[in-house]
Amino acid sequence: MIIANWKCNGNKTMIKDWFISYLNKIKNNGIDVGTVGIAPPSIFFNEVFNQIKKNNLDILTCTQDIAGSSRKCTGAISSEMLQKIHAFSFCIVGHSERRTLYNEDNNIIQDKIFECLKSDINPILCVGETEEENKLGKTEEIIQDQLSILNNLDITDKTTIAYEPIWAIGTGKTPVPTKVNQIHKFIKDVVQSNSINQQKPKVLYGGSVTEKNAESFFRSEHVDGALIGGASLSGAIFAEIVNIKNEIKI
């Protein structure tokens, strides 16, 4: 699974050029990777939908956020609204930027996850520690707390966690692949042990993933894909990362 998170970037020209460069670079329509998705800013949903349809691409549409259960939230978009626009497959929930900039805590994030599930949208729950927490050896403690919002839920094959160490997002710094693999295994074990049906989730890595380092992460046993920020703004680079994932068999 490879997901492009465009964050607050894009315009109509960029989107047109993105798909041209993606098509020029992608092999086999990217289908072998299992799931390829794009999470654009909401005002560009239609442009992305149209390009996917026009080019007959096997790309799923994702949203970067949704409203919680309260409808008293100016500027937000509910899960019901999203499903009336288009059949969204995934929603990013709990990204560190929303935790930090919008003070989203576990209660708010859990509420959003329930809203996703009510509308058959699969949440991608983001978890990760700060640089200070990492240095203090608190990574697992922090992640376990963030994962607690999934306790006593049914875990399906589309349940997805994205491990994004906050200190790696947009900085060019990354944990070594062996450490990432260790943390991903920890995440799978924690979710499995606290779920109703004892299933393991998919776990993606995010945080300064590029075409130059993607292979080292994808060769790790417990890394099921990537949630990609900056590098996903280039259709060619994103396609190259998808191609790399396709070529690796673990």
Image (cartoon, rainbow, N blue to C red):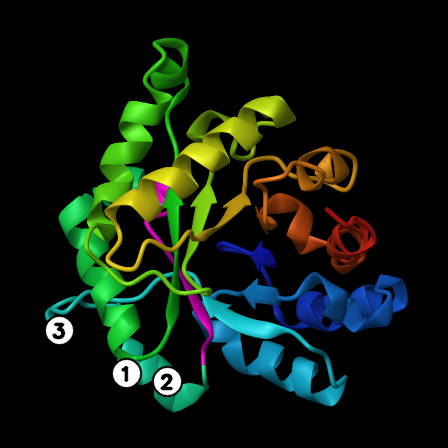
Name the kind of residue labelled 1 in the image.
Glu
- Mark 2: which secondary structure? helix
Disc 1/disc 2 C-alpha distance (Å): 5 Å
Above or below, 170 against 85 in this view is above
Name the kind of residue labelled 2 in the image.
Gln
Q: Quick one: which residue is furthest to the front in this view?
A: 198
- Mark 1: which secondary structure? helix
Q: Is residue 42 left or right of residue 216?
A: left
- In the image, is residue 60 part of the stretch drawn in magenta? no
Residue under circle 2?
83
Name the kind of residue labelled 3 in the image.
Arg
| Dot 1 crowding, Cα within 10 Å, few <14, some 14–19, many 20+ | some
Residue under circle 3?
71
Above or below, 190 against 24 in this view is above
Which dot, 3 or 1, sits closer to the camera? 1
Q: Earlier in the sequence, mark 2 or mark 3?
A: 3
* Residue drawn where x is 41% and y is 18% of the image: 131
Q: Work out whether residue 151 or residue 82 is closer to the camera in this orientation and state it.
A: 151
Q: Earlier in the sequence, mark 3 or mark 1?
A: 3
Q: Which mark is residue 80?
A: 1
* Residue drawn where x is 23% and y is 59% of the image: 153
Quarter of the image where the N terminus is located: bottom right
Residue 30, picture quadrant: bottom right
- Residue 176 percent coordinates (x, y): 62, 22
Q: Is residue 91 left or right of residue 54?
A: left
